[in-house]
Image: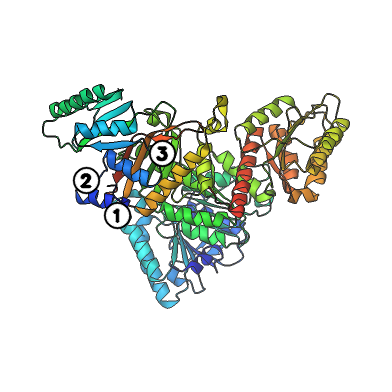
Amino acid sequence: MNQNNLEALFKPENIAIVGASGNPAKAGYVILQNLIRKKYPKKIYPVNPGEKEILGLKSYARLSEIKDTVELVVLITPSKMIFSVMEDLDRRMQEKNDVKAIVCAAADYGETKTEEGIRRQEALISTATKYNIRVVGPNCIGVIDNESMVDTTFVETGVPEARFGPRGGVSFISQSGAIAASILMIGASQALPVRFNKFISIGNMADVDFIDLLEYLEHDDTTRVIGMYMEGYRDGRRLIDTMARIVKKKPIVVLKVGRSEKGASAANSHTGSLAGSDRVYDAAFRQYGITRVESIDELMDTLQAFDKLALPQSENLFVLSQAGGPGIFCTDAVSKYPFVKMPGISGETRKKLKESLPPMAVVCVPEGYADITASATVTNHAQSLQLLLEDDKVGGIILITVIPTFLPKKELAQALVNTYSNSRYKYEKPVYFVIMAGDYVKDIRETLERAGICTFDTPDRAVNAAKNMIKYHQYLEEQNSGGECL
Amino acid sequence: MMLKAGQLLKEVIASGRNALDEYEGNQLLTQYGIPMAETSLCRDLAQALEAAGRTGFPVVMKVLSPDILHKTEAGCVRVGINNEAELQQAYQAVLRNARHYKPDARIRGVIVQEMLIPGLELIFGVKKDPQFGHVVLFGTGGIYVEIIRDVSLRLVPIKVRDALEMIDDTLLSPVFSGARGKNYNKDTVVSVLMALSRLVQEHPVIGEVDINPFILYEDGMISKGVDAVIVLDDSKS
């Protein structure tokens, strides 16, 4: 099918919602509400023969009655109505030939594996194919594009639009609608609610699938990092080949489930039984520089780090902690990853650190670590950060602070912004700020995040993001050096 | 006397079998530069004595029969044969046991194999995945591989960098970095993995390969594979 038609999915000229509803408890209402709230700048056409007007918009009885151009159709009607909706779409296409994409949010199609479900999916796909219309779904929560202000989801995050951060470079593809919805909601619950770039729930993949979307995002300039939740795909090799090509341009972070799956049942050898399908996926991810994460937290943190921070230029990660316990916790977490190094810094930096810090401070014991102690002032925080940023041996820094009540948190936030995000180092070295004080520091974390700083709840979460960035950096380096000898 | 890889595989297919026997597997891997325990196929006692003389005692003796899968249980394997007298005695015994175990078993001969001294036991393998095609495997070998599951996989073809990373993926990584004063070389592992990758690229009909154990020695001694299982892929490709 035609790759260009995906453009209408993200940047449609007007949208019709078949199954729009005046009942706030229904998905057909929330979709409309989300589009209105997002201030989608073009026309929205609700379609529902039982309504005259919904949320102030005129409701149409049929798709074919809309006079204006409609490029995107969202289907949220009960699936048994698909046959009559497709007949009507056929009528419209004979006359206007304008629809280019369908988001079929409704479920009860092919995924049920019943004869009726499969018949419905076939009705949808055969009409779409006839007119070269691309279909997302069925059985999905839809599509978001925060550039064109398209939102066909029925996810209600409860967070007002104005509180969200600016549109980031993270685009996300989810095979599960429920995971997609919870990722949107978890994103909205961050210190600075996350505004994704593009967001696609692909459901049954009856037409548009992982590869179509990956290829679209590959060429989408505002997408800087791609996130994926996946369960499986029918052509793993082609998927991996596609990802391997894209990963050289932008990172891909995958949460894949199915690890617990039993090894191949018909294995003749040890190798056969040891090389189950998930293990093969895992190997492919490692081999081609694709970042596999183990949890939703790691997924969110890694995507944010890739989007907001400079890619590290070395494996050297310095741990700068304002307290002993969290510092040791962090060092332990770092030591799980042998490819991450805690660097020895220059004698001059050591000397300057010692001079500037309280006498109790521990500097470079062990190497790559400093504990500036709970008595550290705002200036101590900022100065030690500055000194480490200036040291050539330091490729990245995890800065941990617990913020005791006697440390003025607003001043601290301002000092960190001045030292880091307003300096050239923001573009050279990643700094992962761990602010370990729960809701007490939510306000200053928001301040930091608005200034483009990445903050984390706990040291281990920062370490996960940091090691994923380092691994990706190493992969790109190896690709570029390309040395092949034996 | 040694058949070329392609010819060997063709003959196995022509004979209606879907797996290579131990001797054929050994031959095929040797051709690809994978060091295997020295193995001779003998038709009579004289050949067996000659083979043992060539290889040097102690040796292992096994009956080669497509109809006897569990050789040890059938009494068709003898290890630690130290001299000609023991060899003569073992030769009669394994054949007698084979006839007793399965009177109509087809017997291709008796294998005389170099008996390797203990070393670091590794596993190398290949599997054709229905979605991804061939994958190579490396890890901790021995009889408990499926319990310990300390293995790493990569899709074929692999690069040297991939082979080195596979070592690092396993618990054996520090062993190759000189743990406990041992001096194991990564080069052997890398070259076996590269050879397996090349083997299945050139002969995609191969469905599975298992070399377990492959015995690795410290620098200065030639490491070798012991048992090789090679299964052909039923589906055409």
Asked if B111 appears above or below B230 in the picture, the reply is above
On what subunit does the disc labeled 2 rest? B
Q: Disc 1 vs disc 2: which is toward the camera?
A: 2
Considering depth in this image, is B51 or A445 the residue closer to the camera? B51
Q: Position of residue A64 (x, y in %)?
A: 43, 71
Spot the residue most to the right.
A355
Question: Viewed as shown, does residue A351 lie left or right of A225?
Answer: right
Residue hosting label 1: A116
Task: State the CA–CA distance, disc 2 to disc 3.
Answer: 23 Å
At x 62%, y 46%, the residue is: A474
SS assignment at label 2: loop
Residue type highlighted by circle 3 = Phe
Residue tagged 3: B124
Q: Are marks 1 and 2 in contact (CB under 8 Å)?
A: no
User: Which of labels 3 and 1 is toward the front?
Assistant: 3
Q: CA distance from mark 1 to mark 2?
A: 45 Å
Amino acid carrying label 2: it is Arg
> Is residue B55 at least partly visible in the picture?
yes
Residue located beneath label 2 in the image = B17
Check disc 1 and give the amino acid type.
Answer: Glu
* Label located before the other in sequence (2 or 3): 2
Secondary structure of residue under mark 3: strand
Determine if marks 2 and 3 fall on one subunit.
Answer: yes
- Same chain letter for marks 1 and 2: no
Outermost residue, left direction?
B104
- Residue nearest the observer in this picture, A214 or A141: A214
Q: Where does residue B181 sit, x and y in percent of width and height?
A: 57, 25
* Count of numbered badges drawn on the protein: 3
